[in-house]
Image (cartoon, grey):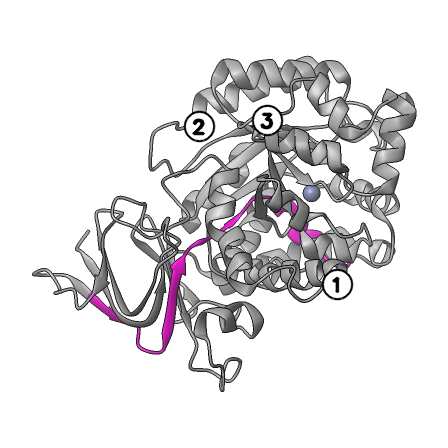
Amino acid sequence: MPDILIRNAATVVTMNPAREEIAGGDVLIRAGVVAAVGQGLAPPPGAEVIEAAGCVVTPGLVNTHHHLYQTLTRVVPGGQDALLFGWLKTLYPIWARFGPDEMFTSAQVGLAELALSGCTLTSDHLYLYPNGARLDDTIAAAAELGLRFHPTRGAMSIGESQGGLPPDALVEREAAILNDMIRVVDRFHDPRPGAMLRVGLAPCSPFSVSRDLMRDTALLARDKGVMLHTHLAENDEDVAYSLARFGCRPGQYAEDLGWVGADVWHAHCVKLDCSEIELFSRSLTGVAHCPCSNCRLGSGIAPVRAMRDAGVKVGLGVDGSASNDAGNLAAEMRQALLLQRVARGADAMAAREALEIATLGGARVLGRDDCGSLAPGQRADLAIWDLSGVEAAGAWDAVAALVLCGPNRVRDLFVEGRQVVRGGQITTIDLPRVIERQAALARALQG
Ligand SMILES: [Zn+2]
């Protein structure tokens, strides 16, 4: 791969420890890694030169929570206006008809949507495996698209007949779940620096698996050296379920079962109280904040200001496309900022802090100290945003404009030094063909 010099950007946002922003900045990429960041860098012989005048260059955005398979069930009428539990009950029977093709195609659509919105590293939470579907289906989709991928092997084991929420047809036996967790970690997980693929373990939520499976999964993750992920304290119903069924709040439940630590991140955490925030801070537990999903499902406003002030690691997530219904990660930056301001006033979150949460914050949540910033030695994951269009015309501050005005689609995107988006188009897959396939699958599910 030849060297790549990105030259003369209006601003390069480094997210380095000093949070430097370099006007007229350049970034040199060599062998998948950032080789230099500065001004007036000379192109090495044979380098590809990319002009970035009028653009802001940022580290690639990091998505810490998603259910890629749900891009195939956006805006399903029965779930459009329901709260979390009612929404789930509408969609479970539809998801029960999915198979490998649905998983692969919907993952490609979701990943392409993320890439176009500046995302270079994403996690995914796949917790149902009907009709032969496997985690392998989404891994194949990400490998083809070229995004850095942290899929998690999710699971549900408590069906309706045992007081759980999902239909019995969508749950698995716990022994089979643990066996498949071992299989996918052994087969796919790459612990090395610069890894393109890391696997995590992720029972769906406290209301769809047993205490035993939560505890066994935590033990298995520690044994294998992989991360843990689940949904926690998403809304009032969720907390009420925890109090009624387990006799404690969600934070206590997590702590009792080994579900706090630097190797754990929880999605949503809208309803964490002060002592739970303190617990997360002390234990270095991460949070995937999903502002649009929280609005869409009316779940509430996560206490992100209080979390950040307490030193809790926070990243952004688009959440599944059935509860967003968009999968645009750049749009989540703006929504995160707006939500904190609704709750706490206009000085509750600055645009640069939202950008930091979306990049460095997400990388920290996913345990990646080699991503999330642009500095020599960091992986070459970066987004080039063209600020010369109508969205930001008249803006006085290009970096803040990226969050407050847009655009929320990239011009170019690099992952591990490979160009995945060029001139606003995905380079690695035939996206129009994938969208057609997705539409055909959606029609078949409706029929
Ligand atoms: Zn979710």
Q: Between disc 1 and disc 3, whose residue precedes?
A: 3
Read off the magenta span. 49-75
Q: From the Cβ of disc 1, is ligand 1 less than 8 Å away?
A: no
- Residue 391 locus on image (x, y percent): 53, 80
Q: Amino acid at mark 3?
A: Ser
Q: Label 2 to label 3, Cα distance in Å?
A: 28 Å
Q: Is residue 223 above or below residue 125?
A: above
- Residue 383 locus on image (x, y percent): 40, 61
**Which residue is the site of mark 1?**
342
Foreground of the two, 145 or 357: 357
**Which residue is the site of mark 3?**
283
Q: Amino acid at mark 2?
A: Phe
Q: Between disc 1 and disc 2, whose residue precedes?
A: 2
**Which residue is the site of mark 2?**
188
Whether residue 164 is visible here, answered yes or no, is no
Label 1: element kind:
helix
Q: Residues within 10 Å of mark 1 (few under 14, many from 20)?
A: few
